[in-house]
Image (tube, rainbow, N blue to C red):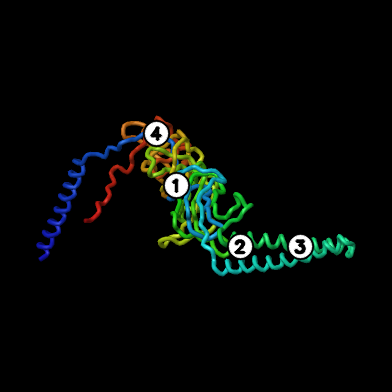
Amino acid sequence: MKKGLTITILIVIALVFFGALYYLYAKNQESPVVFETDKPETKTIIKNTIATGNIVPDEEVLIKPNISGIIEEVYIKAGQNIKAGDLIAKIKVVANVSNLSNSQNQVQSNKIALDNQEKVFQRQKTLFDKGVISANDFDAAQLAYKQAKQNYAASQQSFDIVKTGTTSGLGNYANTLIRSTVNGMVLDVPVKVGNQVIESNNFNEGTTIASVADVGRMIFVGKIDESEVGKIKEKLPIEITVGAIENKKFDAVLQYIAPKGKTENGAIQFEIKASLTNRDDTFIRAGLSANASIILEKADAVLALKESLIQFDKKTQKPYVEIATGPQKFVRKELVLGVSDGIYVEIKSGIKASDKIKVWNQGLKTEEPKP
């Protein structure tokens, strides 16, 4: 039995010995790892964040009537340039029966009062000419007669305004003629001849007859996520890309960041506004969708390196690279980094443009996604 155990141990030792020899032989047959190198580049690195939105006029004025009625004529169309005071539309007044009746009764009452005061005035004038009454009594009668005439004329004007929307003597102030209050381009005319409109007052916004804006002063209005709003501030430069205008970017400046966010699709969004600074002669239509690239940091024509070439010390977490000093010989160099766009990073110090950087992760393989 002892002899069998000895033979088994010897066989195991022999297998282990020959296995080790085979492993060493196979190891010697493998090709040594040859590390490739890469060089730094001179690049302009921009760190930015993106916001989506629209191009809209800085100020859009809604023209509303100050009297209710029916559109009788429209004198403008969308896309037309107009000036303040230009005629926009004419309204035909539909009189309110109750107001019309009250105004008519007021005219009749004032006419009765006027006829009575005229009789009193004529009687007092006769007495004054005969020297029966004093000048003060005559002046009082004359004043009452003039006031009655004025009240009667005013009631007639009020009756005309209720009935037709205007009266003699008002000229350009007639309520039935709607005029532009600003210079600009007509963006929209939402009413047509025959549409009924409501006056603008303290209790009603009124019907919009036209929207007018200065298309020379356009701004970007967009939304930015709460995760990015802490990175931006006012006066930052912005590059605007309009989807409908190819191969062109517009410079802008961030002017406004909403102090309060709104929930949209489960995320908190903050409104931002930016004024365009270089439009050239390009006509940008109001409402076009656009993307705003907000430039957080920018480094022009600096020494840059791919972020994938940079390593970090396990203890200090300081960045470094390995530069070639000879064939497959490398030395470690500490780096000072600057602006990064996620692909390239600015190198402030540590290496030169002529250095060859070791591609340390060339042997790493990423797992393919499972079907």
| Sequence-earlier tag: 4 or 2 | 4
Q: Nearer the viewer, mark 3 or mark 2?
A: 3
Could one spot residue 231 in this view of the protein? no
Q: Nearer the viewer, residue 222 or 6?
A: 222
Residue 330 location, x and y as percent? 36, 36
Q: Amino acid at mark 2?
A: Phe
The residue tagged 1 is 78
Residue 212 location, x and y as percent? 50, 48
The residue tagged 2 is 159
Q: Nearer the viewer, residue 19 or 78?
A: 78
| Sequence-earlier tag: 2 or 1 | 1
How packed is label 2: few (under 14 Cα within 10 Å), some, or many (20 or more)? many
Q: Amino acid at mark 4?
A: Glu
Label 3 – label 2 distance at C-alpha: 21 Å
| Sequence-earlier tag: 3 or 4 | 4
Q: Nearer the viewer, mark 1 or mark 3?
A: 3
Quarter of the image where one finds residue 106: bottom right
Q: Is residue 341 above or below residue 117?
A: above
Label 1 – label 4 distance at C-alpha: 52 Å
Label 1 – label 3 distance at C-alpha: 54 Å
* Mark 1: secondary structure: loop
